[in-house]
Amino acid sequence: MTTEIPFTYAQQLLLGLEYAVPGRVLNPSLIVRGAYRVAHEIDIGVLRQAVDDLVARHDALRTTVSRDPDGVIRARVHDAVPGRLLVHDVDDEDAFLAMATEMPYPPDEPPLLWVHMGRCADGTSLLVIVTHHVVSDAWSLTLLARDLSDAYTARLRGGPPLDSGVLSYAEVAADDHSPAWERTITDALPYWKDRLTGVADLALPVPTPGRRGEQHTRRFTVPAALWRRLGEVARRRRTTPFPLLLTAFAAAVWAGRREAVVPIITAGRKPSEWYTAGFMLNLLWLRLTAGDPGDLDELSRRADAECRAAYRHDVPLLRVLPEAPDLTASIFDPSEIVERTFPVFQLIPKSPFAPAAGDPALLLTPVPEERQPAPVMPLHLLWSMRVDEEVTGIVTYEAEMFGGDWVAEKIGAFLSALERLADA
């Protein structure tokens, strides 16, 4: 049995891109994935039960999204769907990771969760968890890894399976239209109308205007000593390193400009929704100004103030866009040739989730990001900073629009700006 459910505000925003450019979202390449190494033996039968438990717990994974013959895109949740565990014998680990990232994952074939288990020659295993992006996001992925470990531990040791006592994704979508949330949104709209008026004119010119095509990825590392110094500066200012990273990004990518508009990705979740898998992220559009573009200290303090104000008014972008119609037209522009864009920035912190069991029976060690092929993103340029044991930058970009030399130059400028901020 299937039931049609409403879309969250975040999904409606994502699907706006699909209506503007069909195939941009409802395609089998738009995924999020995480790869983990398991050094101990895995009971495949128990792992298969744990994957089933995961699908039963999170209704987003049992949800399919498709376009009906009348052209309307609908979401339908399936009451019962078995999990999908794919077992492989692995000779070439890099080839396995590439296969797990690049194979097709249709958004209309439930469940929208694929778990690849690769049995390696050295006796270890690789687990790759894949979900379609239309029903999941990076926050969900770390949650699913935690829940998979917990489900496996419970099944192996005879404990109760994972319960379904989390807020369902359908309930989150329904709560988007609750009176309390509606009041919060309405109160925030005047702030965004003031901040976003005229921002479409501030889009960044694309170095080489062109069509969407092949995406490339460039990775880099922030030296540990530099990261420690940035942390000390942030503590002195009673803030976090995020405004410093944002300042360096704006100074590098928007070099020499007195004003920059930077969309940043947030988790888009209330505390009650932390344990619910689904696509709920949000975009906050930060308008950064500087009297002197070369004064990074001034720019960083303004960035800090802008971040604080934006987060106080963190409401769904879909509801904000009617206050900025020129920005709406820019975001959903169906033109084939892209001439201007807004590079997107995000910070990916260390996962807040840990297995509930003190001694989990499934120990998942993340595979270093640089070993994993980057999934396709529905953005022209996405600049991510991942904070874990080390701080890694991941720049995913349209190769025809942003050449490798341009990206390398911006990465160098970004690291140089961080050095200057650390000396402040």
Image (spheres, rainbow, N blue to C red):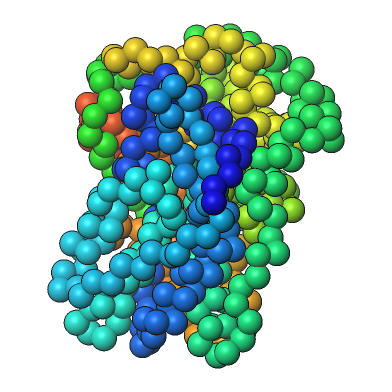
For the point 63% across and 49% down, the residue is: 169
From this view, report whether residue 255 is shown above or below residue 55: above
Horizontal and vertical percent position of residue 47: 43, 77
In this view of the protein, which residue sits in the foreground, 155 or 210? Answer: 155
From this view, report whether residue 352 is shown above or below residue 355: above
Judge left or right: residue 343 versus residue 197.
left
Horizontal and vertical percent position of residue 304: 66, 36
For the point 57% across and 83% down, the residue is: 154
Horizontal and vertical percent position of residue 391: 45, 56
For the point 74% across and 40% down, the residue is: 175
| Extreme residue in the left direction | 91
User: Total label count?
Assistant: 0
Quadrant of the rendered image containing residue 285: top right
Judge left or right: residue 184 versus residue 153.
right
Quadrant of the rendered image containing residue 320: top right
For the point 26% across and 86% down, the residue is: 123
Quadrant of the rendered image containing residue 314: top right
Q: Is residue 48 visible?
A: yes
Q: Which quadrant of the figure contains the C terminus?
A: top right
From this view, report whether residue 145 is shown above or below residue 282: below
| Extreme residue in the front direction | 1
Horizontal and vertical percent position of residue 272: 74, 53
Judge left or right: residue 156 versus residue 291.
left
Judge left or right: residue 176 versus residue 318.
right
Q: Is residue 300 visible?
A: no
